[in-house]
Amino acid sequence: NAGVTQTPKFQVLKTGQSMTLQCAQDMNHEYMSWYRQDPGMGLRLIHYSVGAGITDQGEVPNGYNVSRSTTEDFPLRLLSAAPSQTSVYFCASSYGHSYEQYFGPGTRLTVT
Amino acid sequence: AQKVTQAQTEISVVEKEDVTLDCVYETRDTTYYLFWYKQPPSGELVFLIRRNSFDEQNEISGRYSWNFQKSTSSFNFTITASQVVDSAVYFCALSILPDTGRRALTFGSGTRLQVQP
């Protein structure tokens, strides 16, 4: 099992550019989510999905879109990057009723 | 709304010392899960423990132990005989179980632990 994988590891964008952060898991987990980590603030939920075709907003969804066409993949799209979106992004997945979330290695994004 | 407070921003100890990381949480739900995650300098998040709200038994795993007290809404983490490899940022997190199925973790701001040789 590869677990939760994220690509790319690092990315630099200019203000206004768009891009997609990729997330995939091979554990057949029904639940997937995206968090951002900013210094001194812990992690905050951006979007989540409870299964293929179902997504919903988290705590800080503005400027991001998601879709879940398969159980395995949960990409995060930045529509028009802003410097405030400079952060480390983590994808996570969980199964059943355990509520234990497994995290990917993270993507460090810088918007200039 | 849920809230997790880790009042200790940074702790520095010398190897072999014991250290306790504090976590205080707020929720109106009676059913919830509490977690601790470790984030070493490499950046990944490593799951350490999960505790549900109905299980107040303390847990010990090697040099790690956890003290869950509902009366004070605390879930503290103790490392005994700390080692340099314990140097990391430690996060406490809370998850409730709403009907929506939303399994969001509410994180504390983290405690950076530095273990000096």
Image (cartoon, coloured by chain):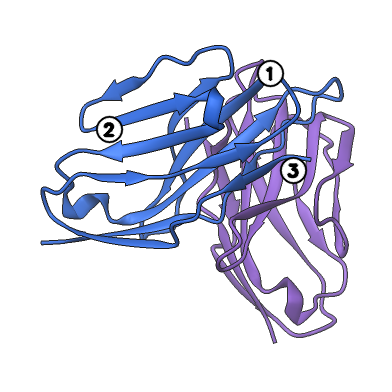
Chain colours: A purple, B blue
Measured as percent of width and height from the top left, residue B7 is found at: 49, 55
Name the kind of residue labelled 1 in the image: Thr
Quadrant containing the C terminus of chain B is bottom left
Asked if residue A2 shows in the view, the reply is no
> Horizontal placement of B41 versus A51: left or right?
left
Q: Is residue A70 above or below residue A7?
A: above
> Horizontal placement of A95 versus B42: left or right?
right
Can marks 2 and 3 be said to lie on one chain? no
Measured as percent of width and height from the top left, residue A106 is found at: 55, 56
Q: In the image, what residue occupies the spot 88% across and 32% down?
A: A54
Label 2: element kind: strand
Which residue is label 1 attached to?
B31
Which residue is label 3 attached to?
A74
The alpha-carbon separation of the residues under discs 2 and 1 comes to: 25 Å
Quadrant containing the N terminus of chain B is top right
What count of labels does the image hold? 3
Label 3: element kind: loop
* Residue A33 sits in quarter: top right
Name the kind of residue labelled 2 in the image: Tyr
Asked if residue B10 shows in the view, the reply is yes
Can marks 3 and 1 be said to lie on one chain? no
Which residue is label 2 attached to?
B64
Q: Is residue A110 above or below residue B52?
A: below
> Horizontal placement of B42 versus B116: left or right?
right
Circles 2 and 3 in contact, beta carbons < 8 Å: no
Closer to the observer: label 3 or label 1? 1
> Horizontal placement of B1 versus B44: left or right?
right
> Most extreme residue toward the front, as rendered?
B71
Q: In the image, what residue occupies the spot 32% across and 44% down?
A: B20
Check the residue under mark 2 and report the chain it is in: B
Check the residue under mark 1 and report the chain it is in: B
Label 1: element kind: loop
